Structures are given as C-alpha cells and as structure tokens.
Amino acid sequence: MTLPPAEATVFARVELPDDPDLPSLPKLFDSGWVCEMIRNGAKPQPARIRIHHFIHSIGNSATVSYEVEWPGDSYLPSDYYVARTGRDGRIELRRYPDDQRLPGLVFAARPDAALQLINDQVLSTPARRARVQLIRYRPGYRAVLRHRFGRIKLYARVVRPGEFEAFLAAYQLSAQSGYLVPGLAGCWDEGGVLWFTELRGSTLRRRIRKGKAPHPDSLLSGLEVLWQAPQRASKVHPLNLERAYQRALRSFKHNLRDFPESSRNLQKLEELLSPFVQSWRPASMAHNDFYDDQLLVLRDGRLALVDFEDIAPGDPLLDVGNFLAHLRWSARFARETHAENCRDYRDGLRHAALSRFGWDEEGLALREAVCLFRICTNAIRHPKADWRGRLDAGLLLVSECLG
C-alpha cells in the first residue's frame, strides 16, 4: 500500500502487504483519501497526520488511528480519528472520543460530562470545573485520561464495560505486590470508568535511560511478594501465552510473506519457540506485562506500580523475561545516549534474578525471547516507513536471546 508522493508532507509513507479479504484496507493508508474523509468538505487541509495504531485481525478487520494537526492559522486543536474496515469493504470513520466499544469514553473525555461524573462518583464536595487531558488511547480497548480540578489530579482509566470487573479484580490483586499502588478514588461500572489518585514521580524507564535507576534487588523484592500471593479463584483469567504468541506469529507471517530471507529466519524462530510456548503453564500469581514503563520512582525512592490490569496466574520467570526483553529492545532502538544504560541495567537485572532465585539460565532466556518476539509487533502496530527493517532487527534480537 503506497501513498501518493504529493501527500507525503502530511502523511508518512507506509507500505504494508494487502489483505485480500479486506478490500478497503489500502484506503486506510491512502493519504489523499484520509485527508478528504477527515476534512469532509468543511475543514482546511491538515498540516500533518500521524498514524498511531494499526490493529489488524488478518482476514477479518483492520483499524487505523490518526492524530491530525491543523495549520497554525486555523486555530484548531489537534484531533484524533479512527477508521475501521471489515470484510464487507465498508469503512467507518469516527472522531475521538466516539468509541462504541468504550461507551464511557465520550463522557470521561468531555469536560462538562467528566465534571458531572466526578461529582457523582468521586467527590464529596462538588467541583465547579474540570480539565481533561488524553494520556493514552488504544481504540476499542482502553484509554487513560488526566482529570484535574483545582489542585487535585486523578487518572481515569476507561475500559470495556464487560472487562470492568476483571480490571477491578486485577487492581485489588496489585495490593498484594510489594509496590505502592495508586488509590481507587471512585468508579462508574456501567461506563467502565475508574479514577485513581496521582502518584508523583518519574518513570522507571526514564531513570534507567539516565543511569539513575534503583538497584535491581528493590525491583525484584516487589515482584517476589506478588509471586507468593495465593492463586485464588477470581474474576481474572490466567495468562494465555500461546494465544498472544500465535497472534504475533500470524502477523509476522502475513507481513513478511513476500520477503523470502525474512520468512526463513522467522521459520527458524518458530521451530525454537513454539515447543516451549505449547508446553508452558502458569506457575504462580504474576504481573504478566511487567516492564520499565509500568513503574514510577517516587521522590522518596519507593517504587510504585501504575499498570496492573494483567495481574493473574502466570510465571515469575516470564515477568523478569519480559522486563529484560523491553530493555534489550530499548538498547537497540533508543537513542545512543540511553542505549548503554539500558544494556547495563538489563545485565544487572538478569544477574540479580539468577543469583537471587537460582533460576535456570536457559529457561529465563527462552522466556525473554518469547516476550521479545511479541514486542516485535511494535513494528506493525505502530507502522513507519522502515517497519520491515525494524521488524527484521527485532527478530534478530530474538535470535540473540536464544544464542
């Protein structure tokens, strides 16, 4: 799918393989079509369009989200649009915060409606004004917004209403870790919205990249408490590692099908990873998506866990392996000034975990490789002009994990 050269100034050129079952998919990467649909005959030509997410269920549906910047003299704030197409070829274009799968988002994202929700569900003394800032948004899945009124700041998490109970249960399990967690200030279960108190600090990712991260032992101590928590029957579901792995594998096979050498390298990795994934079973409670951007280092040095929705039965080695995989990815793709610090912290964390728990080195390496394999989907989910080079480089890192 190739964008017209004339539109490259507002829309980065991305070329991805077609999906024969989704006839309208190329339009989602056609700069001219996207511009006209967004303008709808009324707005000016966008100054810039950036692709945020590409969510592709091969043969079934595709969703692309765009951030749109307007010319400075139009005095229009940036907009966020989402286009979705399916097998019938129809394309649905929606403007944030309209999201059918997140019905609470339209209320949480608009200041007047958000203020009413906060006064109804959170505050004992009504506020008169609320400011809303979008922090993170994955169309159809979840969103994070900052709600500010006076000096008070809360973070609103918006999830699908059907996932509300599981998300709340995972949050309650996070209290069984050795980390500080934000307080739950209120919730609106029908809309799938939860408000959490603000914890002030810097992300562990930033501290690692600056060479100012806490010793790995403090990181492992918080995790170890969580691993020792009893595996009670609850509303959370055990990690399905095979499903996540197979989803990544299908994406890679589809997108690399026209590149023989890349496909051969992928096949070799599949032969090494698939037997492990198929035999893997949960061993204890675990975080299941543990990495450096999920934690804050507070001003007093304590570690706070701010992302916890995947806590469920899992695997301690997989938690550490996932953290190592993210550090390995950062060491490869982060700025050179940060890469060395990422490598050093990864080496220190790996050594500390093996020494502390007496784990098998090969078992930890396998888990790091599987997690890194999944992280390689970043090259597809956040596509850029050099997506294939990034994917090939990422898969080479997986090979390095396996020796």
Image (cartoon, rainbow, N blue to C red):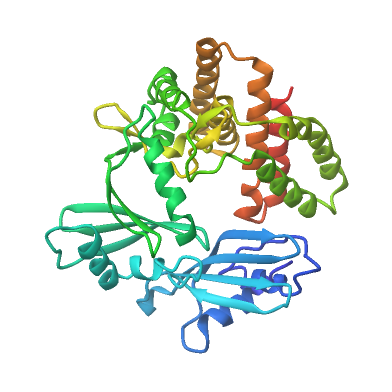
**The residue positioned farthest toward the bottom in the image shown:** 41
Q: Residue at x 19, y 53 (%)?
A: 152
Towards the viewer: 174 or 71 = 174
Q: Residue at x 84, y 50 (%)?
A: 259
Q: Is residue 307 visible?
A: no
**Horizontal side, residue 9 vs residue 106: left or right:** right
State which quadrant residue 106 falls in.
Answer: bottom left
Q: Is residue 244 visible?
A: yes
Q: Residue at x 60, y 14 (%)?
A: 359
Above or below: residue 113 compared with residue 382: below
- Give the quadrant of the C terminus: top right
Above or below: residue 359 compared with residue 383: above
Q: Residue at x 79, y 54 (%)?
A: 254
Towards the viewer: 395 or 223 = 223
Locate residue 174, reporting x and y percent. Answer: 39, 36
- Give the quadrant of the N terminus: bottom right
Number of marks in picture: 0
**Horizontal side, residue 288 vs residue 106: left or right:** right
**Horizontal side, residue 299 vs residue 321: left or right:** left
**The residue positioned farthest toward the front in the image shown:** 233
**Horizontal side, residue 353 vs residue 25: left or right:** left
Locate residue 238, reporting x and y percent. Answer: 57, 39
Locate residue 371, reporting x and y percent. Answer: 63, 35
Locate residue 7, reporting x and y percent. Answer: 62, 73
Towards the viewer: 304 or 209 = 304
